[in-house]
Image (spheres, rainbow, N blue to C red):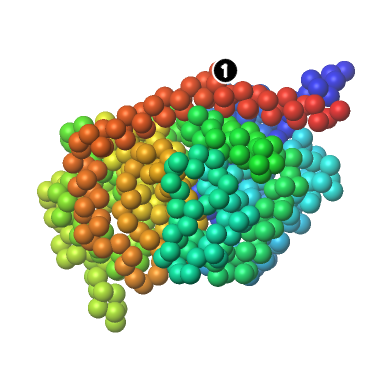
Amino acid sequence: MASSEDKKVEMFFLPWIVARGHMIPMIDAARLFASYGVKVTILTTHDNLQLFQNGVDRDRSLGRDIDFLTFELPEGCENLLSIFTINWNEEQLFIEKLREPIEQILRDRRPDCLVSDMFYPWTAESGARLGIPRIVFHVTGLFPSCCEEATRRHAPQHKVDSDKATFALPGLPNPNHNIEFTRLKMPSFHTTEPKGAKLAEAIVDAELKSHGVIINSYYNLEAPYAEYFKNDMGRKLWLVGPVFLFNKNYEEKAQRGENNSIDGVTILNWLDTKEPKSVLYVSFGSQVRMAPEQFFVLAEALEASGHSFIWVARYMPESGEHEEEGSGRRVLPEGFEERMTKSGKGLIVRSWAPQLLILEHRAMGGFMTHCGWNSTVEGICACLPMITWPLAAEQFFIESLVVDVLKTGIRVGNEEWMALHWEPKVTVTREKVETAVKRLMGGGGEVEEMRRRARELSEKANKAVEPGGSSDADVVGLINELKSCRK
């Protein structure tokens, strides 16, 4: 009879089911662990299963032990999916309602561990009660996590006399990076939102009670912050990324996430007509919504810059170029799309885009990004300098990593944190956007130095996930630790 140490390690993965930016990297991580011989089960709803079925089916055809286990949403949760980002009370209600179906699955199956998104803080308590180690999966990096910790510990935002006054974050490693913020750039739960703060405290408390933390990053990207995270913050840490590098072939990159509104072949054929490093990729992620007024300004600036671009204009209001009824506002300048199509200068993608395929194309010269963690790492690994335009969540912290620490980007000039839903105002002027685009896409020594740094970081990322690399070692180390936990 095989000993318990000889049995396959069984890991359950529970992604945050309402956000693509949370689901996609965890699915990649689950597939990664399956490739190391782990028995992997992904817990999700039937609708979300459809988004990732093809990739998992390919893994199974290669003999990997990976599958989905679906659960039904409790009554009333369907309506919460559309409003969780803007209502803390409803979000916490949604989180709690998922506890019962997930706990029942854990009781029945008893895996070696549960890898859980941070937005399920109750899984720490459930895991402890059931004797199943809970490991947090972070969808952000070490640097923003350390910034959050410094903000919680020292509260420098409450020691200045205005929202625009700058302050440093005490206690972080490498103080020469000149990391400064204002209250306006801080998430609301650090400044004015007590209900949000309560949820944030629950997440941190659950993390401290968990077995450890998996982060989609690699050691050589954020080395000083890895040591801070382990030693000063007291977390056990496994860096297993960048997990998107697990996607090797065209199908995996093209089908990652939702169906594309324009097929990948059409986009790549358009890029094939462009000179190397001549196209700017503009995307603000899967959740951020931008006000119609800001859409209009961005469109004007892109056209005025004279540079070619691909713009993933997700969540553009249905009115298109037409005035919104009763508002007198236009979403895009009159005739904008027609001029971009006729001139070949711009390609607008209304919904999802095959981002990995676009970023790695030789025609790409830069990336205007909201500084979501997935996009940031993907942009760095594509060796692209960035224009940073943070809007929500921890994105201003990530902007500081890109601009101040890694020095692979320039700021567009947004100074104000907002929630994930759009607010009816312009925070970045046309002049600022146009200047940033011309500065980045115009090339020159400054931009080439950013590109060189990104290239070095990209090479280190690929080495990290190779056999013997730092991320490979952390994957193997976690698997071996879970085996030892059986004793």
Tell me what residue is drawn at x 60 percent, y 56 percent.
Answer: 154
Whether residue 249 is visible, yes or no, is no
Question: Would you place residue 121 above or below residue 406 in this image?
Answer: below
Tell me what residue is drawn at x 36 percent, y 28 percent.
Answer: 455
**Seen in the image, is 37 located left or right of residue 452?**
right
Question: Would you place residue 64 above or below residue 165 in this image?
Answer: above
Q: Foreground residue, 244 or 451?
A: 451
| Quadrant occupied by the N terminus | top right
| Quadrant occupied by the C terminus | top right
Q: Where on the picture, by quarter, is residue 440?
A: top left
Helix, strand, or loop for circle 1?
loop
Question: Would you place residue 380 above or below residue 4 in this image?
Answer: below
Q: Where on the picture, by quarter, is residue 337?
A: bottom left
Tell me what residue is drawn at x 48 percent, y 63 percent.
Answer: 183
Rendering coords of residue 65 (x, y %): 65, 28
Whether residue 158 is visible, yes or no, is yes
Q: Which amino acid does label 1 sit on?
A: Gly
Q: Which residue in the protein does label 1 denote? A: 468
Q: Foreground residue, 58 or 150?
A: 150
Rendering coords of residue 126 (x, y %): 79, 50
**Seen in the image, is 454 located left or right of residue 202?**
left
Rendering coords of residue 69 (x, y %): 67, 43
Question: Would you place residue 331 above or below residue 448 in this image?
Answer: below
